[in-house]
Amino acid sequence: MPVATANQTIGPYWHLIEDPSWNDLTRFGAQGGAQGGAQGDVIGGVINLTGTITDGAGALVADAAVEIWQSSPDASDRFTGYGRTRTDDTGTFRFKTLKPGPVAGLGNALQAPHVAITLHARGLLHPLTTRLYFANEPLNETDPVLSLIEDPAARQTLIASPDGPSTWRLDIRLQGDNETVFMEF
């Protein structure tokens, strides 16, 4: 008689978030790059990304898997451009990565520096995907994806704020008031 297996809403690779090195995209020796960027950060320089995840009732989500991917700087042997971590008991996630620069969009449009975020958590049958943009980036005004979001308050749910030297914070709300904008694919 077959034995039922446990449901896993994020698939069979949950164990990868238990390795703390996966939240450090610089772990293979990636280092800084050219000057520029908001808040004095160096494009390609080391930054930290942090935030909390809350549900529709405002409760902290302490067991989510958070993945990030960025296409700038280019992936290499020293920089994978991909990371994965879990939220801790306070619903907080943390990543160490390189500050992205602008990337090509459709036609001649440049996309503002951003990081793609995917969330997996209990109760989510499909992952949620959003983006993290950086406050005070001039290209935010003309970014082709941000421009699709007509409501300025909704657009702000994707904008990370400075939270200390070379640290950026984006809090993610899964539902309700101030819900983060999520992308459909």
Image (spheres, rainbow, N blue to C red):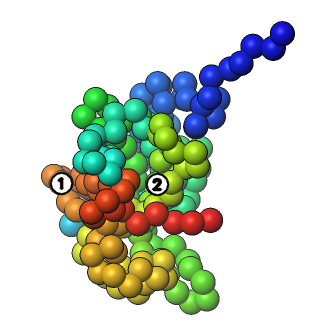
Q: Amino acid at mark 1?
A: Asp
Q: Position of residue 152 (x, y in %)?
A: 29, 81
Q: Which residue is mark 2?
A: 117
Q: Position of residue 179 (x, y in %)?
A: 33, 62
Q: Amino acid at mark 2?
A: Ile
Count of marks, rendered view? 2
Q: Position of residue 54 (x, y in %)?
A: 30, 47
Residue drawn 46% across the image and 54% down it? 117
> 148 above or below 42?
below
Residue drawn 54% across the image and 61% down it? 71
> Looking at the figure, which quarter contains the N terminus?
top right
Secondary structure state at the residue bearing disc 2? strand
**Between marks 2 and 1, how big is the CA–CA gap?**
19 Å
Residue drawn 33% across the image and 47% down it? 55
Q: Could you tell me if residue 155 is visible in this image?
A: yes
> 173 above or below 94?
below
> Looking at the figure, which quarter contains the C terminus?
bottom right
Q: Residue furthest top?
A: 1
Q: Is residue 87 left or right of residue 105?
A: left
Q: Position of residue 12 (x, y in %)?
A: 64, 29
Q: Which residue is mark 1?
A: 163
Secondary structure state at the residue bearing disc 1? loop
> 7 above or below 1?
below
| Label 1 CA crowd tier, 10 Å (few <14, some 14–19, many 20+) | some
Q: Is residue 179 left or right of residue 110?
A: left
Residue toward you, 133 or 59: 59
| Label 2 CA crowd tier, 10 Å (few <14, some 14–19, many 20+) | many
Q: Could you tell me if residue 83 is visible in this image?
A: no
Q: Residue furthest right?
A: 1
Q: Earlier in the sequence, mark 2 or mark 1?
A: 2
2 vs 1, front mark: 2
Residue drawn 57% across the image and 66% down it? 184
